[in-house]
Image (spheres, rainbow, N blue to C red):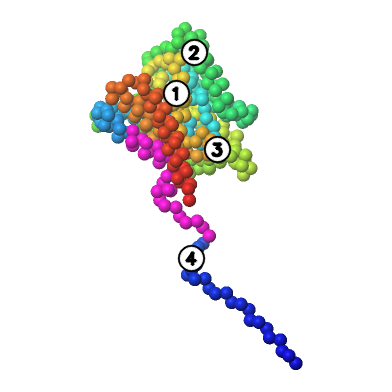
Amino acid sequence: MPMTQQAAPAVSAPPASGPKKETDGRTSERPMWLRLLARPEVGVFLGAVAVFVFFLIAAPPVREAGSMATILYQSSTIGLMALPVALLMIGGEFDLSAGVAVLTSALTASMVSYQLTMNVWVGVIVALIVSLAIGAFNGWLLIRTGLPSFLITLGTFLILQGVNLAVTKLVTGNVATNDISDMDGFEQAKSVFASTFTIGGVGVKITVFYWLIFAAIATWLLLRTKFGNWTFAVGGNKFSARAVGVPVTFTKIALFMGVGFGAWFVGMHQLFSFNTVQSGEGVGQELIYIAAAVIGGCLLTGGYGSAIGPVFGAFMFGMVQQGIVYANWNPDWFFAFLGVMLLGATLVNLWVRNAATRR
C-alpha cells in the first residue's frame, strides 16, 4: 500500500541584521539640555542675564551697589504683583484690574484712617478686606456667568478707576489723600511695609526681601501642594479638572483673591512710603504685571508656567527702567524696550517649548 509522505514544516532563516536590541517599552530619556529647556523660567533667565550684561556695559553707574539696590527695589514693586498674576495666568485667567486695585487698597486705608481719625492699622485691615472682596467678586462673577476673565476684569478696572477718583474727590475735596504720617500706628506700619535695611552701607528696601520670600512660597505652593496641582489642572482644562474632582470654583476664586492680596500689599507699601496717594495712578500697571508674567514663561492660555520665571521677568523690567536712566537715554524709550522684550520673550518661550517637546 502506498505510503503518504508528510512534508516537514519550513523553517525561516534568522535575520542577518544581528541580535535585536532589548527595550522596556519606554521612550529613551531626553538629553539634559532638552529637559532644562522644558523649564518655563530658563528662557527668561537667559534673557535677564543678557539685559544685565548689556546695561553693565552701556550704563557704568549700574555697577555701583547703590544703583543695583535701586534696580532691585524697582523690580520688587513689579514682582510682588507679578507673582499672584502669574499664578492666576497658570490657572487660565488674568486680571486687568490689578493695577488700579493697588490704588484702591491704598486709598481705602488712607481715607478710613484719616477721615475717621482712627489708628492706621484699622485702615490697613479694612483695605485688606476690600482687596480680598474685589478678588472674590471677580472670581465669583467668572464662575457664575462663564464670561471671559478679560471682560469681567475690564469692567472691574473701569469701575475701580472711576470710584478711586470720584470717592477721593468727594471725601477729601482733592485728587489726593491727606498726609497720614502723624497718625497713630504710622511708624509701626511703615516699618512693616516700607522700611529700609542697611547692608554693607547700602540701603535695601524691605520689599526686595518680601519679593524673594513670596516667590519661594509661591514656588512651594505650585510644586509641593495639592492647590498647585489644582492650579495647573484648571488652567489646562477646567472641564477635565472638574471631572476628576478638582474644586474648580474654589481654585479660581482663591487665585483671584491672591491677586487681591498682592494688590493690598503693594498698595500698603506705596501708602507708607509716600504718606499720601494720588487717586489717578495705577492705570497701565496691570499690563506691566501681565507682561512680566508672560516674559517669565507663563502662557495666556493657562496650564503652564512657574513662580520663578516672573521673578526674572520683573528683574528685566526694573533693569531696563532704571538702566535707561543710568545710561542717560530718553526715558520715553522705556515702553519701546518693553514691547521688544515682550515680543522677544514670547518668541523665545515658543521656541523653547517646541525644542523641549521635540523628540
The foreground one among 341 and 99 is 341
Upstream in sequence: badge 3 or badge 2:
2
Q: Eyeballing the image, is 139 above or below 1?
A: above
Q: Does the image show residue 265?
A: no
Residue on which disc 4 sits:
21
Residue on which disc 2 sits:
165
In three-dimensional space, the C-alpha distance between marks 4 and 2, rounded to whole angstroms, equals 73 Å
Drawn side of residue 156 relative to residue 293, left or right: right
Are the two marked residues, 1 and 2, in contact with CB atoms closer than 8 angstroms? no
Please give the name of the residue rendered at 57% of the width and 25% of the height, measured from the top-left corner: 151
Position of residue 155 measured from the top left corner of the image (x, y, whole percent): 56, 21
Upstream in sequence: badge 4 or badge 3:
4
Instruction: Residue type at mark 1: give it.
Output: Gln
Residue on which disc 3 sits:
235
Instruction: Residue type at mark 4: give it.
Output: Lys
In three-dimensional space, the C-alpha distance between marks 3 and 2, rounded to whole angstroms, equals 35 Å
Q: Does the image show residue 50?
A: yes
Please give the name of the residue rendered at 43% of the width and 31% of the height, measured from the top-left corner: 342
In three-dimensional space, the C-alpha distance between marks 1 and 4, rounded to whole angstroms, equals 58 Å
Position of residue 223 measured from the top left corner of the image (x, y, whole percent): 47, 43
Instruction: Residue type at mark 2: give it.
Output: Leu
Instruction: Specify the label residue 148 is tagged with.
Output: none
Q: Eyeballing the image, is 96 above or below 247?
A: above
- The residues colored magenta run 25-51
Please give the name of the residue rendered at 48% of the width and 21% of the height, measured from the top-left corner: 100
Upstream in sequence: badge 1 or badge 4:
4
Q: Choose mark 4 or mark 3, whichever is in front.
A: 4
SS at mark 2 in the image: helix
Residue on which disc 1 sits:
285
Q: Choose mark 1 or mark 4, whichever is in front.
A: 4
* Local crowd size for mark 3, using a 10 Å CA cut-off: few (<14), some (14–19), many (≥20): many
The foreground one among 64 and 80 is 64
